[in-house]
Amino acid sequence: MPKLTIDNLEVTVPEGTNVLEAARELDIVIPHFCYHEALGAVGSCRLCAMMFVDGPVTGLQMACMVEAQDGMVVSSTDPDAIELREHVIEWAMTNHPHDCPVCDEGGECQLQEMTVAGGHGVRRYNGKKCTFTNQDLGPFVQQEMNRCITCYRCVRTYRDYCGGTDYGVFGSRNRIQYGRFQEGTLESPFSGNIIDACPTGVLTSKPFRFKTRLWDLQEAPSICPHCSLGCATIPGGRYREVQRVKAGINRETHGFFICDRGRFGYDHVNHQERPRQARVDGQPVAVAAALTAARERVAGMAREHGPNSIAFLGSSRASFEGSVLLRDWAAATGSQQLVYEAHQGRDHAARTLAARLGEHGRSLEDLRQSDLIVLFGADPLAEGPMLALAIRQAVRNGGKVIVIDPRPVELPCAASHLPLAMERLTDVLTALAQKDLHAFDNHEHAFLENLSEQFDSAQRPVLIGGADLLGGKGVDALCSTAAQLSSAECAVGVMTMLAGPNSYGGALLAGDGPDFDTILDAIQEGTIRALVCLESDPFREAMDPSRAQAALGHLELLVSFDATPGLAAQRADIFLPTRANAEMAGSYMNNEGRLQAFQAVIDPGLPISETGAGNHPPREFFQTTPGSAPEADWWLLAELLERDTTLAALRKTIEQSDECFVGLSAIDAESTGLRFSAQGSLPPAAEQDLLQTGVTDALKLLAITGPVGSHWLAHLSSPLAATQPKPYVVLHPEQAEKLGLSAGDRARLTTHFGHCHVVIRTDEKMVNGLILAPQLWDTALEGMVPGSMLDCQLEKEGKA
Amino acid sequence: MNFWRDIKGTLQPFWITLGYLFKKPVTIQYPEEKRTPPPRYRARIVLTRNPDGSERCVACQLCSAACPVDCISMQAAEAEDGRRYAAWFRINFARCIFCGLCAEACPTMAIQTTPDYEICNRDVLKLVQEKEDLLIDGCGKDDEYNYYEHSGVGVANERGGNEDEYGPVDPKALLP
Ligand code: SF4
Ligand code: SF4
Ligand code: SF4
Ligand code: SF4
Ligand code: FES
């Protein structure tokens, strides 16, 4: 550990730290542009000059390029260093257009800050300024090239860190232009990160364009609600709407960057059709009245038909605290019908994981350091994009990636891929654990043999599974394989992609209660008469939506708590509006069992852009904010159960009643979160056959998660609308040929939902003999619940 | 001693008052009579226009940031030609303390103070003024400045067409 002196202060830093970072340890901030913790130092901006007075290195040096060594004496206040920094910033400003008033970076611009910090106050150069042509980079990123200071941070973020290939740098001398070779939409699903990375106003957010300034934004640390990884985010709101999300920092999980779904998927909070009014039997009522009605009718139902006539359905979207209170409500009613996920496969997977993960749990940071990553039925870009970036960093650090999946899993890094039917994933896991590969032939055998050998030499291997394809049995096999392959020297890690931000928390609370398909049967039979839905929409989320809709029609009482305009919210007898994640404090437990707290960014209310219809706010004044009825899910349930309604008190009670959650009240939203030792229980054994028939002469279709934008909350977010593809199906080219189809053709897809029109895509990386259809909301493919197998027919309608 | 001082102190003010009876009065009979304040007097705030008649304000939110009583609010928007402008702009004169900091902060000379001090109203809502109420037809105190002639976003002129600019350059050019 080198010990050095900076500005007469001594500091000891870990090996490999550069002097700029060492100075930061002492709270000495040296002006800099090109250095970034996640991207490293390249020494291209020449701004971070420091004077090395004594020791192994002497003279004026770029602090970011010098590794801290013992005995160094460094000065940041040396007149030569100050003068150099002043000149460098002056050069950087010679061509700068000085258009801060119309620049969206204004107020949070590193160039503004560094210009002041560098001491450049008066412009001396009176020559003409060089200008550039901008490119249209698609719906997310706005470019204004004149403001560029050529620090290369965008390119290093986009290409090196995120693995994008269609953005780079062109030209020479003072004609350096950043952008695409040809104007067009940025292809990387992480493109938004260059907005955060660019220290100037060249790259700014298009959906946030001209919305507001940092000083008028309400910001708070939050957790992304779009997948089970739980990336830290910082949403910003103003005028009663969430206007943007930028990446927060959590070195244990996602690091410094987030995916475009998380960044641009905030608009569900402001959705026009979002229900904001409590209702009882279709009549608008006050929240208190609706709560009383819910409490009394549920209790009445329990008295009349027994406590088990009421089922409680939580969801992966609800906060952990709300989920605990749902369990308490079920317990208070006496009902055993409690489940936290309407999708059977995802439910079983989450519960199995919560029961079996234990010491095998790995964070994204562990993954970045891993040397062998094997994905079984996990498609990171669809199920949790930042997982793909963590995998890419592992590859950049020398790790290997192997994908075993029926789908053509795309990754932003090199990976070897074995296409294998969904039913056989579990077989592979068992075979690997037992080191018995005789059931596989030819190239499959060779591939798995090779994989098995790699396991023997790997130091930090991690198995990654996906809930959609593996289901409960698959996740069980995944954990068993990890346990069997682990040895004293090398523990095999496990990570599983679950349905949503609090899937793991729900799974812990669900215990060994029934799954939702069992509950649906009971509703169909009439033994369950009432259903309470906490931020869930069983009409759409159940494994077979048509069966769910038929069964749910028999309900006598449907109570829904929700923040989105789902079908359950529309059809509920008693409806209570909840706050969206950006409007409340609470916590989520991510897919490694890490509980992370989030804070409220804004208070709920109809956005001013809506009440003013784009013009100035209405010239009427009210005592209360219109549309401000929604309350946090945990608040509503605490009120309903007549408990103390502060979050702190609630967390204390949870700690007191469940020993395994001790530490809950201590977590704060700025921390890296807390992993609890709590262990769940395995789900009831029976898992339904996933194949749904009803079409004769059939081909097999596997419903999968669509690309960015096809998740429910993402679907409600208008900035992501542009990324929603037209309905399509993917086939292996050989199968397409057999059916007389080729890529780009239009075809008619028939399933038990009916007919719909799709575009044919082909991919030779996928398994032959299967048709893949993504779930796309508000299209004919809406019913394609990921993980379900359907019989289908496909007929050609037109040429490409 | 004190006695004489008190007598003097009692009578002198009467004497001075008496003296003023024979001088010309300085009081103005407002509102019948009105005073003309100096041109840089800080009263009613207006939004001025560019010499070419377009709106000057670019909705940069600097005035609202500078305002110590937070009485300015606005929403920026983008016009077809890329111009940033205020979709709406509101000043609550019931709150304004006429400090003039907004005018000081404005980079485009859009927001200016004027000598019109007659703003009082019994209806507070009438003191909440929108962009339509604030926008005047002239340039105010500077009849030359047009922000977009000097900032390099290519709105007033083509890109690179402002007086102190050249280009746009061709990044794919091979010449040294
Ligand atoms: S576009 Fe931004 S990040 Fe990229 S080189 Fe220019 S200033 Fe740096
Ligand atoms: S990876 Fe998941 S949690 Fe992270 S930003 Fe993307 S959607 Fe959100
Ligand atoms: S004069 Fe002062 S108080 Fe009035 S709007 Fe301007 S900054 Fe605000
Ligand atoms: S009046 Fe001036 S300071 Fe205020 S928003 Fe408009 S341009 Fe900016
Ligand atoms: S930060 Fe050191 S040269 Fe740029």
Image (cartoon, rainbow, N blue to C red):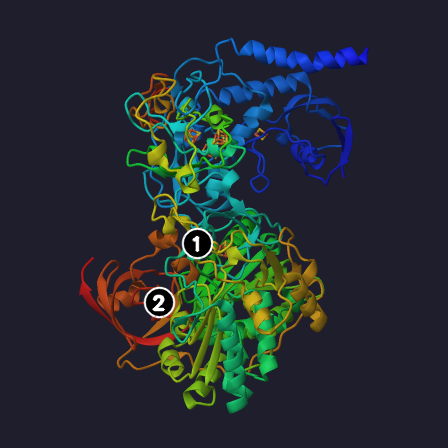
Residue at disc 1, secondary structure? loop
**In the rendered image, is residue A436 in sight?**
no
Query: Which image quadrant is residue B52 in?
Result: top left
Q: Residue B22, position in %: x, y?
A: 51, 8
Count residues near mark 2 (Cα–Cα under 10 Å), then give few for <14, some for 14-19, many for 20+. many
Query: Which image quadrant is residue A510 in?
Result: bottom right
Q: Residue B51, position in %: x, y?
A: 30, 20
Nearer to the camera, A49 or B129: B129
Nearer to the camera, A188 or A132: A132
Q: Nearer the viewer, mark 1 or mark 2?
A: 1
Q: Tell me whether marks 1 and 2 sit on the same chain.
A: yes
Query: Disc 2 sits on a residue from what chain?
Result: A
What residue is rendered at 39% in x and 59% in y?
A716
Residue at label 2? A772
Residue at label 1? A265
Instruction: Inspect the image, locate mark 2, and give the three-letter code of the amino acid beneath it.
Output: Leu
Instruction: Inspect the image, locate mark 1, and give the three-letter code of the amino acid beneath it.
Output: Gly
Q: Residue A677, position in %: x, y?
A: 69, 67
Residue at disc 2, secondary structure? strand
What residue is rendered at 18% in x and 60% in y?
A799
> Residue lying furthest left in this view?
A798
The answer to which of marks 1 and 2 sits earlier in the sequence is 1
Left or right: where A88 falls relative to B88: right
**In the rendered image, is residue B163 in sight?**
yes
